[in-house]
Image: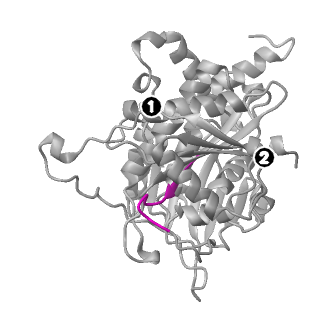
Amino acid sequence: MPREDLPSLLLLPFPPDPSSRSLLSTAYRPSITAALSRLKRPNGASKLTVAVECPILHGQFLRSKTLSWTEAQALVAGIYTIISVVSAQLGIGTEIDGGPNSVDATVVLIDHNRNKRFTEDFRPAIETNNTTVIDLATFASACHPWNYIFHVRSELGLQLYQTYLKLAEGRQTLLQEQLVPVEGGITMNVAPSAQGSSPRPTPAQTPGVPVVCLGGTFDYLHPGHKLLLTAAALLLRVPRKDDANMQPCTYIIGITGDELLKNKKYAEFVQSWETRARTVILFLSRILELSERGWKDTQQPRRVEEKDGDFKAWFRDGTILVHCVRIQDPFGPTITVENVDALVVSGETRSGGKAVNDKRAEQGWKTLEVFEVDVLEAEDVLDEKEGTKTEENFSAKISSSAIRQQRALAKPGTKI
């Protein structure tokens, strides 16, 4: 594979505390801007993995880790918001397979404590836990090779960069030109004592569940879709692969069938169900699959079954099953599959969550715990000088309809 077709890596050090959108923008926007600017190319698409170092997991033992879903998804949402705003300003496409001048970015949370030190004889390897989140040593072992590695010019940024390079040693021969320092912003950490309060308590932890469900169209997969898919994956409770009675945790994704989309604006540019399902699985492979061979094994899932309107893919030695199903009504598998634990919705589909539970209650089934992801909002990270034009361009980066319109405009003879 040509080097320019490999993904690049942006290493972001610890987020500000609290991690409000404005503080995230102040801390991370300069670094994200520099990386996206470097990767924009007129003759093709680029890929970028944004790895954020944060002590997200709690728990003493490897198989009993927990996380705060609310805080984790909010952090992912904040970073995808910044990526979308910067892309709007730089004229960069954000969807997967977006063609020239596009950067397909994936945000990954990496569990790491900045006070952790590795001994000289430590040998990094892939070591999973009961969540989909991985630690820095596992990330370095499974995610390689890279086109560029961007690292932040700051004390914490340099510390993360040096630790990562040590853990990734021997995975890839890197040229000096591939190691790119970028400017960092200002990371604000408000000490509890400065607020006149006691230390901030550990946020409420969210127990993982065996079966998670969500639904959507997923046409021209963009940052809003990526947030939704990543947030739902964070709810999975991953079993041990060596358990004799192991049943994989299941991630059910209802994807709207082509028939229901015939009246969509620019319907002739809607991707086929099969393309949309394969793209969803491709994206999830980036955050779920792990292999010592790196991208040689994770560019595509190693085990996939495709039937009409029913695609399955297994990850992490069969411990995670992603099941994409075609849906022809607003409910999809939530009212045909009883064994579901959680439903993930967006602000746009909040009412659908209530309708699903009402329907399940009518059938005598248990209702689902509903989790709502944050919305990507440009105004959260823009200042007054940046104006409404950026907001308009931002909306186009997280709208499948706007992306279809752009495709229509680019095709000669299309009536708009």
Foreground pick, 240 / 91: 91
Q: Which color mode does the image show?
A: one colour
Q: Earlier in the sequence, mark 1 or mark 2?
A: 2
Secondary structure beneath dot 2 equals loop
Toward the left, the furthest residue is 196
**Residue for point 77% across, 39% down:** 272
Residue 73 in sight from this viewpoint: yes
- Tell me residue 11's x, y (percent): 57, 47
Name the residue type under label 1.
Ser
Instruction: Please report the bounds of the magenta region as a residue range.
Output: 107-117
Using the image, determine if residue 216 lies above or below residue 23.
below
- According to the image, label 2 marks what residue? 6
**Residue for point 78% across, 46% down:** 6
Using the image, determine if residue 100 lies above or below residue 219.
above
Position of residue 78 in the picture relative to residue 405 (left or right): left
- The answer to whether residue 346 is magenta is no
**Residue for point 88% across, 49% down:** 1
Name the residue type under label 2.
Leu
Using the image, determine if residue 143 lies above or below residue 13.
below
- The answer to whether residue 110 is magenta is yes
- Image quadrant for the C terminus? top right
Toward the bottom, the furthest residue is 244
Secondary structure beneath dot 1 equals helix
The quarter of the picture where residue 120 lies is bottom right
- Real-space CA distance between mark 1 and mark 2, rounded to the nearest whole angstrom: 27 Å
- Tell me residue 203's x, y (percent): 29, 55
- According to the image, label 1 marks what residue? 25
- Tell me residue 66's x, y (percent): 39, 66
